[in-house]
Amino acid sequence: MKVTKAEFIISAVGPDQYPDDALPEIALAGRSNVGKSSLINRMINRKNLARTSSTPGKTQHLNYYRINDSMYFVDFPGYGYAKVSKSQRQVWGSMIEKYLLERDTLKLVLLVIDLRHPPSKDDELMYDWLKHYDLPVCVVATKADKIPKSRWQKHMKIIKDALVMRPQDSFVMFSSEEGIGKDELWNQIMQHTGETENYHESMDTEGI
Ligand SMILES: Nc1nc2c(ncn2[C@@H]2O[C@H](COP(=O)(O)OP(=O)(O)OP(=O)(O)O)[C@@H](O)[C@H]2O)c(=O)[nH]1
Ligand SMILES: [Mg+2]
């Protein structure tokens, strides 16, 4: 996917602030500091459109990014950050639950997990929750650059087994640092948004 335009739209606290143009939405869920914002930046070739930080728990709202005027990335607040208060946690939970339940334009959830570690209890709960709502999930195992390639398969199996991943859900090995998995993830996304890629264009001109 050639990204020609990527804009931050809104940091939304509730449904009345969500965009109303009915474009397909790809949501990113994952624990705090796992690399959700970095993943967005890598996917759209921008250094810092999605705000990243080494301080976990920074993103508290649903951050909307519009890509090529044809879809949104929706960056969820990270979960599992110990210093977040119980009341904040509850606000988070009800906002996300309402979004997952009611957002008809949601096409796919990217569940972002650190390839280095087994999924946390929160990761497992999140996956079960998404499956409870029958939402398509793509598990994205990020920070793959931090592990030797020879160990990727082993770590992948640990993650898949712990989540009890459904066969219809996909798994992408990823690194925001090195760009690993970027094309594969775009393919997964486009399968769910109904976008057609410009591959035809290059095929058409091939014989000319
Ligand atoms: N080596 C490496 N570091 C990464 C990768 N992705 C993210 N990081 C680093 O991990 C830290 C957290 O990244 P963010 O993208 O801010 O994480 P987040 O999930 O958006 O965090 P919250 O918004 O707090 O939930 C930053 O220091 C990033 O540079 C990756 O693929 N490889
Ligand atoms: Mg973030």
Image: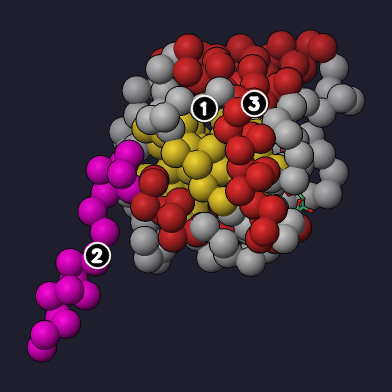
Q: Is residue 181 above or below residue 207?
A: above
Looking at the rendered structure, the kind of residue marked 1 is Met
Identify residue for label 2. 198
Mark 2 and mark 3: Cα distance apart in space = 37 Å
Earlier in the chain: of badge 2 and badge 3, it is 3
Q: Could you tell me if the residues under marks 2 and 3 are in contact, i.e. CB atoms within 8 Å?
A: no
Res 42 → quadrant: bottom right
Residue drawn at (76%, 39%) of the image = 117
Q: Is residue 130 magenta?
A: no
> Element type at marker 3?
helix
Identify residue for label 3. 162
Q: Residues within 10 Å of mark 3 (few under 14, many from 20)?
A: some
Looking at the rendered structure, the kind of residue marked 3 is Ala
Q: Find residue 204 and report its horizontal and vertical position in percent.
A: 12, 75
Res 32 → quadrant: top right
Identify residue for label 1. 165
Earlier in the chain: of badge 2 and badge 1, it is 1
Res 83 → quadrant: top right
Q: Residues within 10 Å of mark 2 (few under 14, many from 20)?
A: few
Where are the magenta residues, as a range? 190-208
Q: Find residue 197 and report its horizontal and vertical position in percent.
A: 26, 59
> Element type at marker 2?
loop
